[in-house]
Image (cartoon, grey):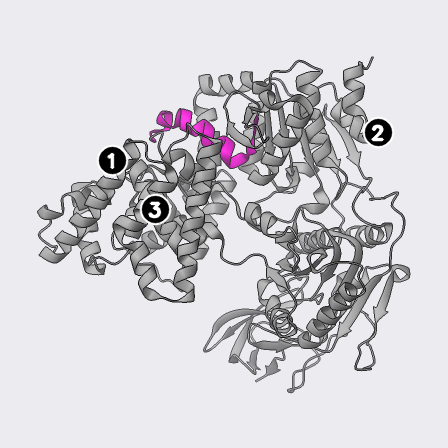
């Protein structure tokens, strides 16, 4: 029987939400549709377990998709059950003063794994103060290994190698297994790079992002006592965004939850859009197969959008065959019809969006910050951005260079990384001549040869520069200056200098600040401001975690995801938001424009003829549409110039899946007759191309790429080997190919 405390926590929840919050135990799958209040369910379930079930906060592990989501979850739980439960202390104003260990674990997968590895890394032969390499650092190391192995950068691009290694790690495939499975020259090359890359990471005492997951799984697999300790500790495991987990994350949850089997996963298969990052939709589709005793609860009541928006989104996603059946509904009533605009070209499309959004703002219905424009690829933003600039419309583009990926930020952080982990060769290589101090490429090569010969890290080789006879006297002096700066910084850190002050000291002692000031450019002043912002971030971190050191700050920074930065940027601010749909996950706007709905653009050309890829593109469309609260616009252009080539693509198949009764056409202001949105006839552009596409082995000509030979036909796509440009995939009916 429900107690008064139970009823208080369950008040205000709908029936499926109450069932999920009060679930007695055992595996639980919460299918949470877009805008269905899943965060409220997670928050109240955590509070319910602590307050009403007597579960220790320390026995709860809650995994979220972003650090920002984790912080919000902590705040909401604290409001229900108090700060002590979540390990928070506040000052008199209510501001979080510090966070303490001992409360419930609420974090991302990577943060939780980093915390476990800090305590257990020595079991795997790594130092507790290991470095964490982000994608840029990892990419640089992979590129260096590729260069050292004399790989052809065209045949074996370092970025492709890094992506393949990441894919293998996400699937828990080590380099030995990968080598055994290699089927072609590229994979054999990747196997060799993978082995050496892993060895260099180990020598540097570093993990890349994927390693944080993989090494934690390895740790729990190898050591029974460690596995048993964490299994015993976590009586309940809750995971948000389950549809976006990969094999390594799934295995980690399975291993930890095996003891108590109180695992609650929350997700929506219709919003699984990160396959390219290794997400495996089977984790949610097959959860009930893996946990036969699981309870399924569906949250299908939407609290965000009108029924018009929901029915349009429901109609699109219904065309996916492999999914869990659900249909979103709302009590909020119907809204305006979805407006569809057929543009002559991308400039016409941009003009429609710009004039329509200004008309909405002028009508006093909404502000600029209530409007978002979504597109499939970043390149589509250029035309609209140029027009908004000319019109003076305030806007922001989400998805540019991330703050922590800016050169000046990574440079300063590299100095701090070397203080914590002197074996971090990637950090040492980055800053030994930054700012420039006279250690050129040849001197760096001499240092690296010495380090290899003596089997020591690069920084140790710098400390022994006077022994290196391949270095000139000027270079030896420059290296000595570099070491002296690091030693002064190390002394300051050991003396307990504040993190913000330590960051300022890096800029002062190295001459970095002075160099930027002397350039006197807008860009250099902006970089100085970024360094000041970094010091501010460090100050806030130390206020929240007074006992944390440099290593703790570096870990926090390394684990800030792109989704965290995008979500903070995307919060209104009185500006129209432009972003890719992948960056829009988790956001909502009163007005949404989805542009570029053409086959070959959205859905992306890589998905044509590939059922799994097409299903993901349709889920992406569903995500885009369900961000809209009241008004939804969908647009396409009959011709579009993108990546330097003009194409006549047919309207997206997703447009043909919209219910006619819920869509109204927006007529072009020029009075041009609107073409009907219909299935494309198989035609060719002007230029003599045949109505039937050429087949494999045929010689063809292309206006941009010249002569070539068709190598492969896959559905609606052709792979053509052009004499002067190599192999390219093209849409068969719209590439403008002419038989030679």
Q: Position of residue 76 (x, y in %)?
A: 66, 31
Q: Quadrant of the N terminus?
A: top right
Q: Position of residue 145 (x, y in %)?
A: 32, 51
Q: Position of residue 703 (x, y in %)?
A: 56, 83
Numbered label attached to residue 450? none
Q: Nearer the viewer, residue 216 or 556?
A: 556
Determine the residue positioned at 41% across, 57% down. 527
Q: Per the image, is 123 magenta?
A: yes
287 left or right, relative to 401: right
Q: Quadrant of the C terminus?
A: bottom right
Determine the residue positioned at 34% across, 31% down. 126
Earlier residue among tags 3 and 2: 2
Between disc 3 and disc 1, the foreground one is 3
Q: Quadrant of residue 607?
A: bottom right
Numbered label attached to residue 15? 2
Q: Nearer the viewer, residue 248 or 432?
A: 432
From the image, tell me which residue sits under label 3.
504
From the image, tell me which residue sits under label 1.
491
Tag 1, which secondary structure? helix
Q: Is residue 723 above or below residue 35?
A: below
Give how far apart the Cα atoms at labels 3 and 2 are: 54 Å
- Looking at the rendering, the stretch of residues picked out in magenta corresponds to 105-126
Tag 2, which secondary structure? helix
């Amino acid at each position: 029987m429900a107690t008064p405390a139970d009823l208080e926590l369950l008040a205000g929840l709908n029936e499926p939400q109450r069932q999920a919050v009060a679930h007695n135990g055992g595996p639980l799958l919460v299918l949470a549709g877009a805008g269905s209040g899943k965060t409220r369910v997670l928050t109240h379930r955590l509070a319910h377990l602590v307050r009403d079930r007597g579960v220790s906060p320390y026995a709860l592990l809650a995994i979220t998709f972003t650090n920002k989501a984790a912080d919000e979850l902590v705040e909401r739980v604290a409001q229900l059950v108090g700060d002590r439960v979540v390990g928070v202390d506040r000052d008199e104003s209510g501001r979080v003063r510090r966070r303490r260990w001992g409360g419930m674990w609420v974090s991302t997968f990577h943060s939780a794994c980093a915390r476990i590895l800090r305590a257990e890394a020595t079991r795997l032969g790594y130092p507790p103060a290991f470095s964490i390499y982000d994608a840029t650092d990892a990419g640089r190391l992979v590129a260096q290994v590729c260069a050292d192995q004399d790989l052809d950068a065209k045949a074996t691009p370092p970025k492709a190698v890094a992506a393949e290694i990441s894919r293998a790690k996400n699937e828990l495939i080590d380099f030995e297994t990968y080598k055994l499975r290699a089927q072609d020259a590229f994979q054999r090359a990747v196997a060799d790079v993978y082995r050496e890359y892993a060895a260099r990471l180990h020598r540097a005492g570093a993990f890349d992002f994927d390693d944080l997951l993989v090494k934690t799984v390895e740790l729990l697999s190898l050591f029974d006592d460690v596995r048993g300790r964490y299994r015993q500790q976590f009586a309940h495991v809750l995971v948000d965004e389950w549809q976006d987990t990969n094999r390594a994350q799934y295995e980690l949850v399975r291993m930890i939850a095996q003891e108590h089997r109180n695992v609650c996963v929350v997700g929506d298969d219709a919003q699984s859009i990160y396959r390219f990052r290794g997400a495996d939709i089977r984790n949610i589709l097959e959860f009930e197969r893996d946990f036969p005793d699981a309870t399924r609860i569906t949250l299908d009541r939407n609290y965000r959008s009108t029924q018009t928006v929901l029915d349009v989104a429901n109609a699109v996603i219904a065309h996916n065959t492999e999914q869990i059946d659900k249909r979103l509904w709302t009590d909020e009533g119907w809204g305006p019809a979805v407006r569809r605009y057929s543009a002559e070209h991308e400039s016409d499309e941009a003009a429609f969006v710009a004039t329509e959004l200004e008309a909405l703002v002028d009508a006093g219905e909404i502000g600029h910050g209530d409007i978002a424009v979504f597109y499939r690829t970043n390149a589509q933003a250029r035309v609209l951005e140029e027009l908004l600039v000319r019109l003076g419309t305030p806007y922001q583009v989400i998805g540019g260079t991330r703050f922590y990926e800016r050169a000046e930020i990574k440079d300063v952080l590299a100095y701090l990384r070397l203080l914590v982990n002197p074996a971090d060769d990637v950090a040492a290589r980055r800053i030994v001549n930054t700012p420039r101090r006279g250690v050129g490429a040849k001197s760096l090569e001499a240092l690296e040869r010495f380090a290899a010969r003596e089997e020591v890290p690069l920084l140790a080789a710098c400390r022994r520069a006077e022994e290196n006879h391949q270095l000139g006297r000027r270079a030896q002096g420059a290296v000595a200056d570099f070491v002296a700066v690091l030693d002064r910084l190390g002394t300051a850190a050991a003396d307990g200098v504040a993190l913000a002050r330590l960051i300022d000291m890096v800029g002062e002692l190295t001459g970095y600040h002075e160099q930027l000031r002397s350039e006197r450019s807008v860009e250099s002043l902006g970089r100085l401001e970024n360094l000041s912002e970094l010091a501010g971030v460090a100050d806030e971190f130390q206020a929240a975690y007074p006992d944390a050191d440099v290593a703790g700050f570096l870990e926090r920074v390394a684990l800030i995801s792109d989704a965290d930065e995008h979500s903070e940027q995307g919060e209104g601010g009185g500006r129209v938001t432009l972003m890719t749909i992948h960056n829009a996950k988790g956001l909502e706007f009163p007005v949404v424009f989805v542009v570029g709905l053409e086959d070959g653009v959205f859905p992306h050309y890589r998905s044509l003829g590939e059922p799994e890829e097409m299903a993901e593109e349709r889920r992406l469309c569903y995500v885009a549409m369900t961000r809209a609260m009241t008004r939804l616009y969908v647009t396409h252009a009959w011709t579009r110039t993108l990546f330097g080539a003009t194409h006549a693509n047919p309207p997206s198949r997703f447009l043909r899946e919209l219910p006619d009764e819920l869509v109204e056409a927006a007529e072009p202001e020029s009075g041009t007759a609107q073409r009907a949105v219909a299935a494309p006839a198989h035609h060719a552009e002007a230029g003599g191309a045949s109505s039937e596409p050429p087949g494999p082995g045929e010689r063809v000509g292309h206006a941009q790429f010249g002569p070539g030979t068709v190598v492969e036909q896959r559905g609606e796509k052709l792979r053509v080997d052009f004499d002067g440009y190599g192999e390219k995939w093209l849409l068969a009916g719209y590439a403008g190919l002419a038989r030679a």
